Image (cartoon, helix red, strand yellow):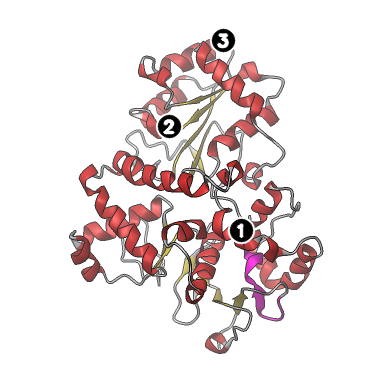
């Protein structure tokens, strides 16, 4: 246990708290069992360490952070660690990468039941199933999802500005005033393209030169390790997932022909739909449907996108001018879909929360395609200010 304590103190001493994700304020930290899920590389570990440092700066003896992929657990159990921690006055334990620990759900359930005085916070892959876990933690855990950086957070983390988040309704109703407030301080397009290329994952701060390599390693880890581990995919079928992701990246936004696609990849129709669902869960793609899905229902997506523009620039290579519209739609889906329901409407590009129809386009995009619709708006790229029902696309990056 001493080695774990030493690693914990070392990490706390170096973690930076100058910028803290806005999700920190939305988490109910007093809950007894908290889960934070997210894709690899979005900053889950940093979030935990920042919270500990800001909350328990002078009381570190009461808390403990451990990563469950630490070699220490090859010879020791989590139960023994927790028992010793509680006996020595520990009150709160932070468990990183819980999906790396064998039978993690049962271990956490037992700790939760056996030590009612202990508060537990854990992080996990976005693929982790809380509801279907054998110990069923869904009734006990309060679970949050951590996305990558929004455009607003990207600006804030670099000290370019200190902008507040706004709601979707505020953007719809007051976009001119909101855009004016931002443009008074910065020129958004001085930074927007950099964000689209490399700004979604916080590890861009560790060097632009190594960013593509690190993002590629993240994708490989998801496909070759986490999906087989958490979805029981035979390792020999990982090549099918790679083929599928490659096809989507070449053609996104991709309207899937399931029969043709299943023949090309040589897997049956239902397996293909399941694999598309897995790639969505892994936060590698976004799936758009014409109607909301029922709980647990697996349906054929009506349109597919890569999950964020950073993935698009990495996997699709150099983006042609004709494909700029895809980047715009990918950005909108990624930023708005984090906290709003998006559907594929008959007119326009996206239907938000069953109410707002959004057409995506460039600065000269008109409203002809949606002119007869109520609550219909254009999200226009290459404009600093909007007017009427035309809203700057970049402003949708200020939702969180």
Residue 293 appears in the figure? no
Q: Position of residue 63 (x, y in %)?
A: 60, 21
What residue is at 44 percent from the left and 73 percent from the top? 344
Category of crowding for the residue at label 2, using alpha-carbon neighbours closer than 10 angstroms: few (below 14), some (14–19), many (at least 20)? many
Local SS, label 3: loop
Q: Quadrant of residue 371?
A: bottom right
Q: Position of residue 266 (x, y in %)?
A: 18, 60
The residue indicated by pointer 1 is 194
Local SS, label 1: helix
Residue 202 falls within the magenta-colored stretch? no
Say which of 392 and 170 sits in front.
Answer: 392
What residue is at 55 percent from the left and 16 percent from the top? 5
Residue 329 appears in the figure? yes
Does residue 189 appear to the left or right of 213 in the view shown? right
Category of crowding for the residue at label 1, using alpha-carbon neighbours closer than 10 angstroms: few (below 14), some (14–19), many (at least 20)? few
Does residue 153 appear to the left or right of 105 in the view shown? right
Residue 389 falls within the magenta-colored stretch? yes
- Which segment did they paint magenta? 386-396
Tag on residue 128?
Answer: none
Does residue 273 appear to the left or right of 381 in the view shown? left
Say which of 168 and 186 sits in front.
Answer: 186
Image quarter in which the C terminus is found = bottom right
**Label 2 vs label 3: CA separation?**
23 Å
Q: Earlier in the sequence, mark 2 or mark 3?
A: 3
Tag on residue 88?
Answer: 3
The residue indicated by pointer 2 is 98
* Badge 2 vs badge 3, beta-carbon distance below 8 Å: no
**Label 1 vs label 3: CA separation?**
49 Å
């Amino acid at each position: 246990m001493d080695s774990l304590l030493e690693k914990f103190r070392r990490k706390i001493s170096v973690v930076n708290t100058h910028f803290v994700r806005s999700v920190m304020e939305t988490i109910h930290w007093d809950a007894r069992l908290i889960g934070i899920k997210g894709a690899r590389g979005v900053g889950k570990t940093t979030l935990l360490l920042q919270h500990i440092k800001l909350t328990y700066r002078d009381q570190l003896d009461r808390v403990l952070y451990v990563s469950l992929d630490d070699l220490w657990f090859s010879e020791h159990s989590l139960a023994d660690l927790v028992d010793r921690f509680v006996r020595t006055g520990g009150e709160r334990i932070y468990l990183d990468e819980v999906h790396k620990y064998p039978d993690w759900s049962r271990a956490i359930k037992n700790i939760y039941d056996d030590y009612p005085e202990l508060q537990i916070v854990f992080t996990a892959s976005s693929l982790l199933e809380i509801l279907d876990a054998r110990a069923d933690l869904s009734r006990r855990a309060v679970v949050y999802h951590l996305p990558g950086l929004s455009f607003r957070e990207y600006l804030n983390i670099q000290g370019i500005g200190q902008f507040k988040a706004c709601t979707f309704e505020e953007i719809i109703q007051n976009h001119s005033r909101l855009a004016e407030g931002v443009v008074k301080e910065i020129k958004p397009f001085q930074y927007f393209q950099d964000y689209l290329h490399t700004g979604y994952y916080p590890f861009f701060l560790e060097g632009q030169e190594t960013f593509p390599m690190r993002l590629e390693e993240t994708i490989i880890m998801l496909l070759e390790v986490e999906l087989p581990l958490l979805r029981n995919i035979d390792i020999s079928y990982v090549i099918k997932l790679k083929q599928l992701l490659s096809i989507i990246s070449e053609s996104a936004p991709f309207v899937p022909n399931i029969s043709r696609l299943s023949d090309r990849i040589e897997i049956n129709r239902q397996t293909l739909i399941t694999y598309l669902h897995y790639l969505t869960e892994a936060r590698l793609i976004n799936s758009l449907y014409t109607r909301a899905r029922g709980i647990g229902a697996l349906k054929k997506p009506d349109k597919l996108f890569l999950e964020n523009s950073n993935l698009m620039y990495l996997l699709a290579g150099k983006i042609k001018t004709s494909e700029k519209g895809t980047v715009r739609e990918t950005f909108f889906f990624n930023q708005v879909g984090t906290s709003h329901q998006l559907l594929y409407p008959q007119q326009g590009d996206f239907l938000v929360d069953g109410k707002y129809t959004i057409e995506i386009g460039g600065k000269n995009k008109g409203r002809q395609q949606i002119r007869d619709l109520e609550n219909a708006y254009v999200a226009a790229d290459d404009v600093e200010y909007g007017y009427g029902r035309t809203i700057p696309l970049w402003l949708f990056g200020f939702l969180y």
